[in-house]
Amino acid sequence: MQAPFSPYLTAIAPGLKKLIALLEERYDYASVLSTDSTGFAVRISQRAKSVDNQTMTTERGTVARVYKDGLYSEYAFNRFDPDHPEITFSEMTAALDAQLALLRRAGTKPYETPVLPDEPQTLSVEMETERLPETEDMGRLIAALTAVSDEGMARGRDLVDCAASAQSTHICKLFLTARRDLRQSYVYSEGSVVCIASRDGRTEMGREGLSGRVGPELFDDLRGCLDEALKSVEELLSAEHVAPGEYDIITSPDVTGLIAHEAFGHGVEMDMFVKRRALGADYIGKRVGSDRVTMHEGALCAVDVTSYAFDDEGTLAGDVTEIDHGILKTGICDALSALRLGTVPTGNGKRENFEHKVYTRMTNTLFDSGSDTLEDMIASVSFGYLLKGYTSGMEDPKHWGIQCIVEKGYEIRDGKLTGKVVAPVVMTGYVPDLLGSVSMVSFDRGVFGNGGCGKGHKEWVKVADGGPYLKAKGRLG
Amino acid sequence: MLNTLLDLLKNASLTGWEVTDTQTLGWEFYLIGHRLDQHRAKQVEHIRVKVYVSLDGGRLLGSASGEIAPTASRADMEKLIAELKTNASLVKNPSYTLLPPSGAPKAAAVPAPDPAPIAEAFLDALADLPETKTAYLNSAEIFANSIRRRLITSTGIDVESVYPSSALEAVLNAREGDHEIELYRMYESGTCDKAETLTSLNETMRFGVDRLRAMPTPKLEKADVIFSTDAALAIFDWYFIRMNAAFKFRGLSDWEPGRDIAPGASGDRVTLTAVSFLPNSSDNASYDAEGAPIRDTVMIRQNVPERFLGGRQFSCYLGLQDSFIPGNYRVEGGSRSAQELREQDHLEIVEFSDFQVDPLTGDIAGEIRLGYLKQGGRTTVVTGGSVSGSMKSFINSLLLSRETRQYNNRLIPFVTLLKDVTVTGAEA
């Protein structure tokens, strides 16, 4: 079935168009992004159960963007009467005028930017899904999650708890200008199983998740995560600390994705080029990795939680080759940054929600596959680690530092896994050194869309990332 | 709209319900250098509803929550309540009693703060920044919010909080020739304390200039590490979360009331108190999100857990009386001055990529962006490498300075020293 577009947005669209007409009498450009995204989040564990109709991306509201005298201004609101758009017009202009008065008093000049183009365009996309979150049988879902939790407790050793979680969101977005009318509707879902065990004064957590641009049918496969979560927590309970140093490493696809995200994903967000906060701006056309490194970014280069039809500025989704055989080709760009840099937007202008500003943000960020097998990669390592799972990462576009906190590493000696596990593993280093050391790339790859991504320490959005197994050199601690 | 929603809830044959209505007026300025990238205003209202259904003859209590739009029709409200009621009947938690009213006045009869002067004070602070050709502002984001939050429950709670909440994100650069570095800061507070903001930004610019001459962190294996910036918050948040009622009930904290968490500790012992008020905190409140009164309460005294605190459900499960969800906390200073703690060889790290303490395992981790390595009376500025180790061992010998420093909703020792931290150098 196709995910139906929001009746609410359909109903208020004529009123929003009247609002745009009023704004165009006063400003040189006006657009609105209106959202109506619904969903659910369920978490079932032995100790506590919860259900909510709010997820990270559920929202209903509107943001209007206007332009005059080289300056962009925005007003976010969620009390809109489509029969009386003049009320919102008055509130919006009063608020923005008050701000401008203050800015004039403070002597703050605008960072002058050209006006956005507004070519006629119409699009209406309702993407495929088997089921919808708003009509999901919650009784059946909660029973299934309870069964996973119960089975985990029955099978696990020294388990404190086993939690099964499911979130599904039906995204509906409407982008309007005087000449453009874009509408999209799609569903994405994500689930996870978390096992927590305590033994000999040590408490550890093993987890496994799955995600996709699909409906709640995704959760039919959630039980498959339990085996890996149980295995992981057992390994972590007996893990040792890694001796600090530089090692041969093989990154599993989830860690490869984290590197893609932190190393060059953030590093080529071109709003950072405008602020001169990214070293990547000076390296376009230059080598930043080995010949084996090719990286793509875009809502179209995979189908996962953030594979939309258009971004939050009405730019159609894209697929950008950021690194081609080790050479940095280009970055990703939101619409205003593209105007400032004299380039074209890539469909990466995203907001945390309608209340937040647009930034250049990632969608799907992936290393391309190679031709090696994991077995050959392991056989080539005399002493090193196969890294799997991650806790977090942190970008550093200005200096190309990288911090990845990896869940665990499997020791490899003389071309074989020894069975010894180290955890947690802090991988740090200089991005070009890390990518320059990539010497083998597997033919298979994975994409992962659980969790969220911040910019600095805020602005949380959904992203997906991944790639194949990579063999490289990494500094671990 | 709110009255209709309340009427519908009262007549929905529910065991209980809660409604939280939060209205926010926000002003935002985004700057590239000192030029205006864009400005934004927001005027939004979010209404959260939670319903409770008694199950299995009162042995179980189900609950479900959700948000409803402020423009929702009566039919929308009826639909939401019906859905929540159905969902609540499926979520079978052990029963607990809903929070009764505390007898406090219904509403804070004060006008909502104006975000304009808050935003203006941040602009003034940035304008007064003593920039040079070597150290200067790269970009900044200013957020000034005026928030009015009202909580109404089926048990008779009807309280309102009105408060400011603001933030400044500042990126500061330092440059020497072609070598340019940046330092990132995120300050959160109630309103803008211009003097405090300028002091902190000046300190950050000094760090930036120092980073220009930083050397790769050498292989140290182990070092005593001093934390003197906001990274130290992660250390005390670890203590704080382990005293959270939900964390305890879920079996994630093995701390017990009255049992020393580090018997025989040779260092300073931690005393952590939940407090209702800290100057200019964005978390100052008389009531928590569930309407429970917030009182100054010692949670850990001299390394001995005294009071777990948290939301109603888990507090009831643990049998905690007069519990609440704390917002601010204060950690007492230690026995030595910051200067005394800096006398011995150490690595003082003032800038991390993202310093973290795993709440479950106590493992610490962070990439070093700027540190001062003191060895044999000589201090070297260093960058790169990382720290690791576990709070479970560090608590036996941690040292705290007498002096304290406030970061929004947390008042902590000015200097915290962890002994024998594993330091992975940046040198090959």
Image (cartoon, rainbow, N blue to C red):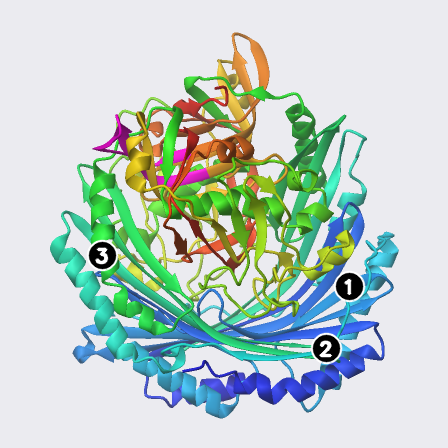
**Who's the residue at 50% across and 47% down the image?**
A261
The quadrant in which residue B393 appears is top left
Q: Chain of mark 2?
A: A
Image marks 2 and 3: residues in contact by CB distance under 8 Å: no
Residue closest to the eye, A218 or B115 = A218
Residue A72 is marked as 1
Describe the element under mark 3 as helix, strand or loop: helix
In the rendering, at what x and y percent does residue B195 appear? 72, 40
Q: Earlier in the sequence, mark 2 or mark 3?
A: 2
Q: Amino acid at mark 3?
A: Leu
Residue closest to the eye, A145 or B111 = A145
Tell whether A365 sits left or right of A114: left
**B111 magenta-colored:** no
Q: Earlier in the sequence, mark 1 or mark 3?
A: 1
Residue bearing the label numbered 3: A226
Most extreme residue toward the front is A371
Residue bearing the label numbered 2: A177
Residue closest to the eye, A50 or A6 = A6
